[in-house]
Image (cartoon, coloured by chain):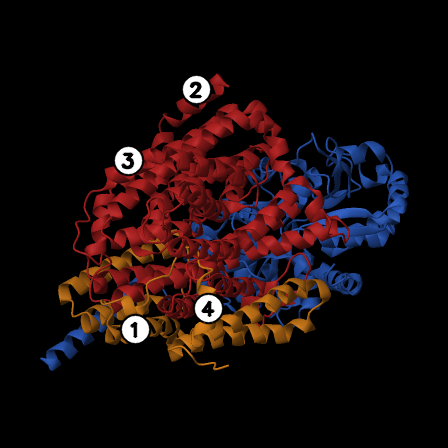
Chain colours: A orange, B blue, C red
């Protein structure tokens, strides 16, 4: 039987394999637990791995895909191919920006990150004018500080750059 | 144009650094000025729980005894059964602005059982004092209480079929109390674990289990239509006359009761402490103010109103009791089953 | 009873109680809108302030904050639920916003929530005397099966094939296994890290999968949230009328939410999902969901607010808090020397009514705000993403941090943002992850407790009447797609035959 009978995206396959790897790692660690603690994980992973294999096969094999599709009750979601509004360049920039923003939280601490991150997005990626940037960042920073730090009492880390620790 | 943009960006960054520096106070430890800002009482559980209420009561009434009368706030850091809060306070700046609420028995046990996870050393904290310890009770269903009038009745009942004890989870105080009780009295007990003490109590009301052992404060609030406090693990009848008979009056042998109560995991002293290298005069200031707090009528009334009570001990005296507590806990840790 | 009712009203409408109540409502509104800040946290933040107050002043402040915290607006406008129980609202609420019908969705959410809480308060009053046996009828076996029913329903109703739904749900289930199991005492898959000891927290995952992923979606598209040029203003009244037209669905879901709220430990998330899945199955036959069906907003919103009113029952009468918010409420009462239980009902009936009246009024306040500010809030969907996203992303990341005061939760949210975005691209129903994470602990812990109660016998799951009914329901739900598939195949064959015949 020919396996690769469907046009597929490498990223789609990669996601399935990533999830399968996660399940397999957990399955590998499960026998080391005591009997009651491993009961549920064993049951779940015993089902999850074959289902994962089926789902991975449905990505690359048309017959499997069509068979499984008939079990859907509520239809399919919209995918990228249907989305005319999506810009791949913007998409890549968005992902890089967000991951960098999260990294800034670690490196320079939330108080500074909350200024630098939004500024970069608005000014350099969105070409928003300076006044709007200042107002937006200023209001957001003050509101977040008042609510999260003063009212709720969150103690913010200072960031690795300033000698802080996690 | 590029130069102007770069200049603007530099101005933005410099301005924000200036603003933040003005907003955030980063001060060197200044013993002479202490305390200059709010002090945190670090609680190792979520808001609303038993320990959280106690922490909030302390935070409410303590500031008036401090110089500068700075406010005190509760910081909840849940995780690892309270270990995370202790770990974080242990490695925090030893400036006297973080006071950890210590569940002595639980932390001693954790230090013994999970040395890889625990960063602190119980004997090395600088203790401000103990504010209370548990008085536990044997709580059971009304129909069971009607059948077992004495300790001997309880022993006979357990011989026919092991008693079922509900707990708030493996390693919880309800579980360790049950294990200590079973070990010392030699009564056969099986455990049914739930993800919290409320669920454990509800299970008792649903008649799925026979008893549990918990602190007197939550036990007194249990529905008297369904549940009864059979006896109190305390030999001071004067303290809780209206609640239930003491264990001695119920028929538990004196040496057994002493062994149970002397176990620090059972008596669960609740203490307050600061990190090891906190300056000595800050520790003294906190200890003095703590003692004034403990001996005030207002504090006693507030705790009583919340259905709790104070059983204070000075920090220096508490530290003297620690070596025995550590030794007793290490002995107990060997008999505590890991898991059910 | 009447004296108690009037007593409660006279306390609430006195000064400064009414002022404090309004302050609490405003605070609750803010907390509800911000991810990571929930009603329970609003209560915890306000509790110390109430120490010096009279009980009559403390209760309006606290209940005002709790009742007014409402997370449906962000679920509809930004696909980001303010609280976990609003996750079901996103499925149809956000597509409505994308179609330019945000106002209608907000109106429907607000009005159905209001109706839900009123219905549950009404039921509360009626069944107060007989509440005890209802609360105590549900034990660990029923909880376990209820959670499994929820998981089965999610896998089936998710978009795409059943296998896809299960595949994604298993991720959530596996995530829930990390950490300490309080029932067995086992510590699983922590890789030596204390961070994982308490397991993977729900909120950073929720924030990442939905809030931050939606930020990515907004930035990746050339237009705003509203992908059309249809007018977004107005429609609130249309949403209210939709709730009135679908009154049977509203009442059904409110009753279901009330039942879930009465049972401690079930929670609003289970209530909203059960209401969504059963509500649309019974009242939405032949209709599509997940693309902007107003019934898909009415069902969960009605249930999750009805749960609030009902959760007061076990909390005030038995002293058993079913949720974090009611746990904090009980703590606040205790600090003021008021103990839940018979004492409260017998000697402080006016306080019981005060709590109920505050809850009702705070819901009126917050839902009116949602409905009438909906027109204004809906306009946010027209703002350029590069202006809106920094605000949303910042509050999301701060919210993720504040939950456990842990910077690693921020990293977790970031990871799930990228992961969730990729899942969206390839048609994976990521809501299954959320439900797996929420329902698995309930299922597993209840399972083990049941086995401990029965001392090793599995028959406890079929010998109790409630459990047996739930087992049958689970099997029906799981086999429904295959039955449906066979039915469709047979129907096709029959049609072909009749055409050729």
Q: Does label 4 or label 2 sit earlier along the sequence?
A: 2
User: Cβ–Cβ below 8 Å for labels 3 and 2?
Assistant: no
Q: Is residue C457 above or below residue C307?
A: below
Whether tag 3 and tag 1 are in contact, CB under 8 A, the answer is no
Instruction: In the rendered view, tell whether residue B71 sits above or below residue B325.
Output: above
Which subunit holds the residue at mark 2?
Answer: C
Q: Nearer the viewer, residue C92 or B49?
A: C92
Q: Earlier in the sequence, mark 3 or mark 2?
A: 2
**Does B209 appear above or below B238?**
below
Please report, as a chain letter, where disc 1 is located.
Answer: A
Q: CA distance from mark 1 to mark 2?
A: 57 Å
- Mark 3 to mark 1 CA distance (whole Å): 42 Å
Q: Which residue is mark 2?
A: C6
> Badge 1 is on which residue?
A97
**Real-space Cα distance between discs 1 and 4?**
19 Å
Query: Dividing the picture into quarters, in which one does residue B15 lie?
Result: bottom left
Q: CA distance from mark 4 to mark 3?
A: 45 Å
In the picture, measured across the screen, residue C370 lies left or right of residue C135, that is left
| Residue bearing mark 4 | C408
Q: Which residue is mark 3?
A: C241
């Amino acid at each position: 039987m020919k396996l690769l009978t469907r046009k597929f995206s490498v990223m789609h396959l990669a996601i399935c394999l990533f999830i399968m790897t996660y399940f397999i790692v957990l399955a590998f660690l499960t026998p080391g637990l005591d009997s009651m603690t491993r009961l549920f994980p064993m049951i779940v992973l015993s089902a999850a791995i074959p289902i994962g294999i089926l789902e991975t096969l449905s990505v690359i094999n048309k017959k499997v895909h069509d068979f499984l599709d008939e079990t859907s009750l509520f239809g399919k979601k919209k995918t990228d191919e249907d989305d005319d509004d999506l810009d791949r360049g913007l998409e890549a920039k968005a992902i890089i920006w967000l991951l960098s923003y999260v990294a800034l939280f670690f490196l320079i601490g939330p108080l500074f990150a909350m200024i630098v991150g939004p500024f970069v997005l608005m000014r350099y990626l969105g070409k928003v004018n300076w006044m709007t940037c200042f107002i937006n960042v200023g209001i957001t920073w003050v509101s977040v500080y008042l609510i999260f730090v003063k009212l709720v009492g969150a103690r913010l880390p200072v960031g690795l750059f300033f000698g802080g620790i996690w | 144009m590029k130069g102007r943009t770069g200049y603007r960006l530099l101005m933005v960054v410099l301005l924000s650094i200036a603003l933040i520096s003005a907003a955030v106070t980063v001060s060197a430890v200044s013993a002479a000025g202490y305390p200059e800002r709010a002090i945190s009482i670090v609680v190792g559980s979520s808001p609303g729980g038993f320990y959280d209420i106690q922490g909030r009561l302390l935070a409410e009434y303590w500031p008036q005894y401090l110089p500068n009368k700075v406010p005190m706030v509760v910081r909840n850091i849940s995780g690892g059964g309270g270990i995370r809060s202790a770990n974080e306070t242990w490695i925090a700046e030893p400036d006297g602005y973080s006071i950890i609420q210590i569940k002595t028995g639980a932390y001693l046990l954790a230090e013994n059982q999970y040395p890889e996870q625990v960063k602190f050393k119980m004997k090395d904290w600088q203790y401000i004092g103990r504010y209370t310890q548990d008085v536990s009770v044997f709580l059971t269903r009304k129909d069971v209480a009607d059948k077992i009038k004495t300790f001997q009745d309880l022993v006979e009942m357990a011989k026919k079929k092991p008693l079922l004890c509900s707990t708030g989870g493996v390693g919880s105080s309800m579980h360790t109390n049950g294990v200590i009780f079973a070990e010392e009295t030699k009564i056969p007990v099986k455990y049914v674990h739930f993800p919290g003490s409320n669920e454990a109590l509800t299970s008792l009301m649903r008649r799925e289990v026979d008893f549990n052992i918990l602190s007197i404060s939550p036990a007194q609030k249990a529905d008297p239509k369904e549940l009864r406090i059979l006896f109190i693990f305390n030999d001071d009848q004067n303290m809780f006359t209206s609640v239930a008979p003491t264990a001695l009056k119920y028929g538990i042998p004196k040496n057994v009761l002493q062994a149970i109560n002397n176990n620090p995991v059972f008596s669960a002293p609740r203490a307050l402490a600061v990190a090891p290298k906190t300056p000595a005069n800050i520790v003294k200031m906190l200890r003095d103010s703590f003692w004034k707090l403990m001996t005030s009528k207002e504090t006693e009334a507030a705790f009583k109103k919340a259905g709790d009570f104070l059983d204070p001990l000075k920090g220096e005296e508490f530290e003297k009791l620690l070596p025995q507590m550590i030794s007793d806990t290490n002995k107990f840790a060997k008999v505590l089953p890991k898991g059910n | 009873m009447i004296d108690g009712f009037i007593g409660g009203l006279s306390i609430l409408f006195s000064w400064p109680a009414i002022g404090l109540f309004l302050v609490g409502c405003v605070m609750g509104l803010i907390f509800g809108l911000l991810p990571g800040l929930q009603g329970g946290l609003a209560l915890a933040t306000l509790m110390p302030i109430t120490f010096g107050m009279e009980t009559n002043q403390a209760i309006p402040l606290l209940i005002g904050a709790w009742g007014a915290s409402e997370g449906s607006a962000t679920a509809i406008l930004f696909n980001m639920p303010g609280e976990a129980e609003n996750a079901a609202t996103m499925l149809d609420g956000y597509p409505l916003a994308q179609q330019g019908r945000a106002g209608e969705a907000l109106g429907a959410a607000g009005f159905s929530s209001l109706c839900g809480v009123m219905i549950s308060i009404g039921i509360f009053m009626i069944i107060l005397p007989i509440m005890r046996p209802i609360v105590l009828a549900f034990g660990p076996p029923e909880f376990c099966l209820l959670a499994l029913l929820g998981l089965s329903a999610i896998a089936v109703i998710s978009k795409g094939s059943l296998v896809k739904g299960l595949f994604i749900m298993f991720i959530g289930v596996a995530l829930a296994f990390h950490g300490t199991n309080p029932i067995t005492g086992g510590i699983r898959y922590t890789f030596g890290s204390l961070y994982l000891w308490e397991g993977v927290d729900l909120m950073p995952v929720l924030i990442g999968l939905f809030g931050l992923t939606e930020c990515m979606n907004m930035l990746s598209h050339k237009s705003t949230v509203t992908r059309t040029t249809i007018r977004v203003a107005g429609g609130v009244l249309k949403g209210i009328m939709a709730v009135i037209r679908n009154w049977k669905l509203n009442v059904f879901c409110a009753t279901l939410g009330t039942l879930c709220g009465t049972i401690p430990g079930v929670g609003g998330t289970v209530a909203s999902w059960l209401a969504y899945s059963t509500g649309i199955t019974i009242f939405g036959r032949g209709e599509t969901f997940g693309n902007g069906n107003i019934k898909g907003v009415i069902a969960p919103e009605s249930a999750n607010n009805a749960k609030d009113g009902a959760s007061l029952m076990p909390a005030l009468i038995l002293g058993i808090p079913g949720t974090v918010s009611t746990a904090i409420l009980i703590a606040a009462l205790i600090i003021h020397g008021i103990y839940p239980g018979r004492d409260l009902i017998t000697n402080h009936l006016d306080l019981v009514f005060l709590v109920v009246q505050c809850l009702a009024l705070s819901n009126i306040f917050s839902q009116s705000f949602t409905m009438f500010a909906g027109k204004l809030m809906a306009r946010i969907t027209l703002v350029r993403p590069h202006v809106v996203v920094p605000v949303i992303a910042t509050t999301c990341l701060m919210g993720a941090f504040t939950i456990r005061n842990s910077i690693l939760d921020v990293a977790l949210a970031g990871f799930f943002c990228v992961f969730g975005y990729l899942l969206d691209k390839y048609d994976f129903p990521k809501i299954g992850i959320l439900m797996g994470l929420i329902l698995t602990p309930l299922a597993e812990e209840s399972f083990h407790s049941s086995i401990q109660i029965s001392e090793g016998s599995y028959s406890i799951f079929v010998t109790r009447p409630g459990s047996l009914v739930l087992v049958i329901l689970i099997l029906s739900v799981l086999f429904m797609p295959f039955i449906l598939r066979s039915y469709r195949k047979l129907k096709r064959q029959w049609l072909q035959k009749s055409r050729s015949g």
